Image: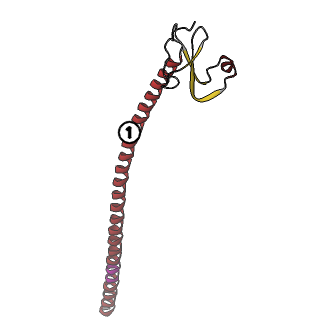
Amino acid sequence: MAANTMDAIKKKMQSMKLEKEAALDKADQLEQKLAEQKEVNEKQEEEIQNLQKRISQLEGDLDQAQTQLEEATQKLENTEKQLNNRDRVPAGGDVIVPNMECNPRNVASRRPLPQSGCAISRQASLRPTSERGPHLYAGSFPSKQ
């Protein structure tokens, strides 16, 4: 009986020793996995920080581009307003017809000529514009009689 009890105790100690080794092996494996996961997390956090910096840069670039677009749009609107104001017939003034021969018959046919323009007064007399080119003078000319 004492021998059976000793054998049972030895078997129990052997099984507990095996369980302890298995638990230590499992703990080592889990510690290794934990270290690997920490390394992956650090890399991902670094990537997140880099992406956040990039997002900030892109937002700054977007703000700058929107500002430039607003400025360009405003300049375009101002230029269009100036062009529209210049194309209007001033009271009692002459009108410049761009790229037209200074011939009353050609005004009706609208035959274009490069770099030419005619000033048409309210009395329908046609005169060439100054050497400054078309659209540069929209004032009144003295009437030819």
Q: How is the image coloured?
A: secondary structure
What residue occupies the far front of the structure in this picture?
Answer: 145
On the picture, is 11 further left or further right than 139?
left
Image x and y of residue 105, in percent:
69, 18
At x 33%, y 58%, the residue is 46
Magenta stretch in the rendered image: 16-22
Above or below residue 94? Residue 20 is below
At x 31%, y 86%, the residue is 9
On the picture, is 86 further left or further right than 32?
right
At x 31%, y 93%, the residue is 3
Q: Quick one: SS at disc 1? A: helix
On the picture, is 132 further left or further right than 3?
right
The residue indicated by pointer 1 is: 64
Q: Who is closer to the viewer here, 37 or 107?
A: 107
Q: Quadrant of residue 32?
A: bottom left
Image x and y of residue 123, in percent:
60, 8
Category of crowding for the residue at label 1, using alpha-carbon neighbours closer than 10 angstroms: few (below 14), some (14–19), many (at least 20)? few
Image x and y of residue 106, in percent:
67, 21
- Image quarter of the C terminus: top right
At x 35%, y 68%, the residue is 36
Above or below residue 122? Residue 5 is below
Residue type of the residue flagged with mark 1 = Gln
